[in-house]
Image (tube, rainbow, N blue to C red):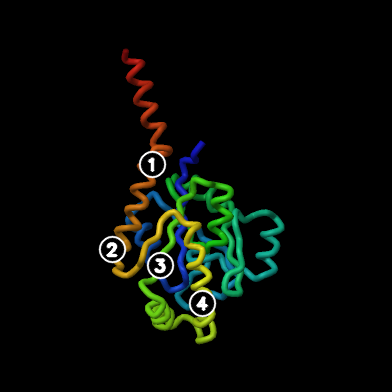
Amino acid sequence: MVDDLLLVIISSPSGAGKTTLTRDLLASFSDLTFSVSHTTRRPRPNEVDGNDYHFVDRARFDALVQEDAFVEWAQVHGNCYGTALSELSRARAQGKKGVLFDIDYQGARQIKAVRPDTVSVFVLPPSMDALKQRLRSRAADDDATIERRFNNARTEIEHYGLFDYIIVNDDLEEAKLRMRAVIYAERSRRTRMARVAESLLLRSRALG
């Protein structure tokens, strides 16, 4: 049976714009919530613990792995990232209808293995030159980190086949519209709307 909670993975190489597109979805759909991942990465100046990420040290992260607290976890760019099972419970408790995940292809593969109905979207940059420029313009990382993220981009793009949808983030406003369209389309999928149709049939039979 398909879970009522819509799970949506948004992934991309660093700098392709997945964070901006995720924020737009949260602003456009009040019944969606963001899954706050745990990470061993140091917070950037504009990031808030518990809002952008749960920032923990490696020892704490490893302890959570041993406790089977994560639905998925992976090592990315030299740091660990994980999605706690408690994020799904939190979404249900808040009455949300969907959860957005900002994770890489490794996490996407793990979640889809457990929940095959999970929707996955991969965001591409318009070009590799544009990607490098975006990484530099963020001014959030040192040169070594920028080079490492850029060099890892090819590996991430090679895994595009794991994803259900691909959006090229060339024109930001168009990319936002395409991302919203994914949500509308998935909410209209037959497997998710079957209960509504069956309910109408039951009522019609009751009325004779």
In the image shown, does 113 or 33 lie closer to the viewer? 113
Q: Where is residue 133? Give x, y as percent.
A: 39, 81
Residue at the spot of label 1: 189
The tag on residue 149 is: 4
Residue depicted at x 56% and y 59%: 107
Residue at the spot of label 2: 174
Q: Amino acid at mark 2?
A: Glu
In the image shown, does 10 or 57 lie closer to the viewer? 10
Q: Amino acid at mark 4?
A: Arg
Q: Is residue 40 above or below residue 194?
A: below
Q: Where is residue 177? Give x, y as percent.
A: 29, 58
Badge 3 crowding class, 10 Å Cα cut-off, few under 14, some 14 to 19, many 20 or more, is many
Task: Tell me which numbered mark, 3 or 2, is placed earlier along the sequence.
Answer: 3
Query: What separation in Å lies between label 4 and label 2 (alpha carbons)?
Result: 25 Å
Task: Tell me which numbered mark, 1 or 3, is placed earlier along the sequence.
Answer: 3
Badge 1 crowding class, 10 Å Cα cut-off, few under 14, some 14 to 19, many 20 or more, is few
Query: What separation in Å lies between label 2 and label 1 (alpha carbons)?
Result: 23 Å
Q: Amino acid at mark 3?
A: Leu
